[in-house]
Image (cartoon, helix red, strand yellow):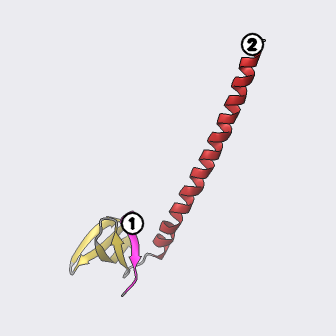
Amino acid sequence: MDLKLFFDVSLILAINAAILFAIYMLISFLRLKKRKQPFEELHQKLSVGNNVLLASGLYGKVTDIKNDVVMVEIAPKINVKVSRFAIQTIVEDQ
């Protein structure tokens, strides 16, 4: 009798753990989706001529875009090749 009770309790614990894990994964997925949305919008708006702020803190102007590589002019005649994902924000003209 004690062995059956042990298996019943173990089964209930396993089911509860699986439910909690599923809830945790759902919440994590929703948070990640919410955090990715602004960056997806930024990459859709990104175009040649935009002034941008890079994750390194450098400001520059986009001169060329090819897939995941962006050429950014950080000073006159000084272009750097950066990952598209290094662009943190598009800076509005002041």
Where does residue 5 sit, x and y in percent of width and height? 75, 18
Please identify the residue farthest to the bottom as the structure is shown: 94
Q: Which disc number belongs to residue 84?
A: 1
- Image position of 33 (left or right of 52): right
Where does residue 35 sit, x and y in percent of width and height? 51, 61
- Residue at 65% from the left image edge and 43% from the top image edge: 22
Q: Is residue 86 magenta?
A: yes
- Image position of 62 (left or right of 26): left
Give, as a three-letter code, the residue at label 2.
Asp
- Residue at 66% from the left image edge and 36% from the top image edge: 18
Q: Earlier in the sequence, mark 2 or mark 1?
A: 2
- Image position of 13 (left or right of 88): right
Residue placed most toward the observer, 12 or 47: 12
Where does residue 31 sit, x and y in percent of width and height? 56, 56
Q: Is residue 10 magenta?
A: no
The residue indicated by pointer 2 is 2
Where does residue 71 sit, x and y in percent of width and height? 31, 72
* Residue 62, quarter of the rendered image: bottom left
Magenta stretch: give its range.
Answer: 85-93
